[in-house]
Amino acid sequence: MRRARILGTLTLVVLAVAGCGVPLDAEPRSLGASGPVDRSGSPAAQVAGSTVLRLYLVRDGRLVRVPRRVPAPLTPAQQLDALLAGPTAEESEDGLSSALTTTTVTRIDLAGRRATVTLGDRAGPGVRSDEVLAFGQIVCTLTNLPDVGTVSFMADGAPLWVPRSDGSLADTPLTIADYSSLLD
């Protein structure tokens, strides 16, 4: 009797496990090309990226750190491209903007932990009132990356004098501390 009970229980377990297999499709399908699938075999819902991109945008004359989800870590050049693209529609609706609307970057080099940003054509002589915010956006965004400790700027082959939040100009490498009084 006991043997029959054990055999019956074992049969039920085997049948239950066999019913939990992967369903068969009539035709082969590629899973990698169409993206991830859920347990039913249907395409899975897109989820936000696993890496946080931290950009600095402007709101009410202050620098605001804005997180965005991206699929993978970005290089300093990619992160700068995302910053130069400006706020998303949702971020704009939230009152965020960019002081980088007229800034052109021709290259970015990374040596050691210093990013050197080369700017393209500069507007005529003089300093725009939001220029300190523009440079602050770049410096604060890039120094959030683990491989960037300081940022320096070049224009026309020479170091560029850049405004800091205290009103002084510097042609030396800058850090987020140079813009701390503008951080929100």
Image (tube, rainbow, N blue to C red):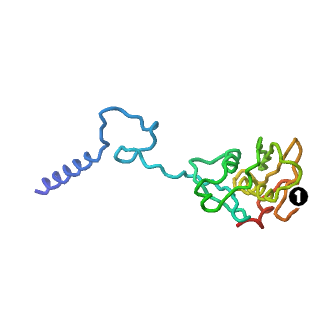
Q: Nearer the viewer, residue 160 or 41?
A: 160
Would residue 33 appear left or right of 176 to someone viewing this image?
Answer: left
Q: Residue 102 in the image: x percent, y percent?
A: 76, 49
* Horizontal relation, residue 106 to residue 28: left or right: right
Q: Position of residue 138 (x, y in %)?
A: 74, 53
Q: Residue furthest top?
A: 27
The location of residue 123, given as percent across then percent down, is: 83, 48
**Callout 1 amino acid:** Leu
One can see residue 129 in this view: yes
Q: Count neighbours of disc 1 (C-alpha within 10 A) and say few if under 14, some if 14 to 19, many if 20 or more.
A: few
Q: Residue at x 33, y 32 (%)?
A: 27
Q: Quadrant of the C terminus?
A: bottom right
Left or right placement of residue 62 versus residue 45 in this view: right
Q: Nearer the viewer, residue 54 or 146?
A: 54
- Residue topped by disc 1: 169
From this viewpoint, is residue 171 visible? no
In the rendered view, does 77 fall on the left or right side of 170? left
Q: Position of residue 52 (x, y in %)?
A: 60, 54
The residue drawn where x is 67% and y is 45% is 78
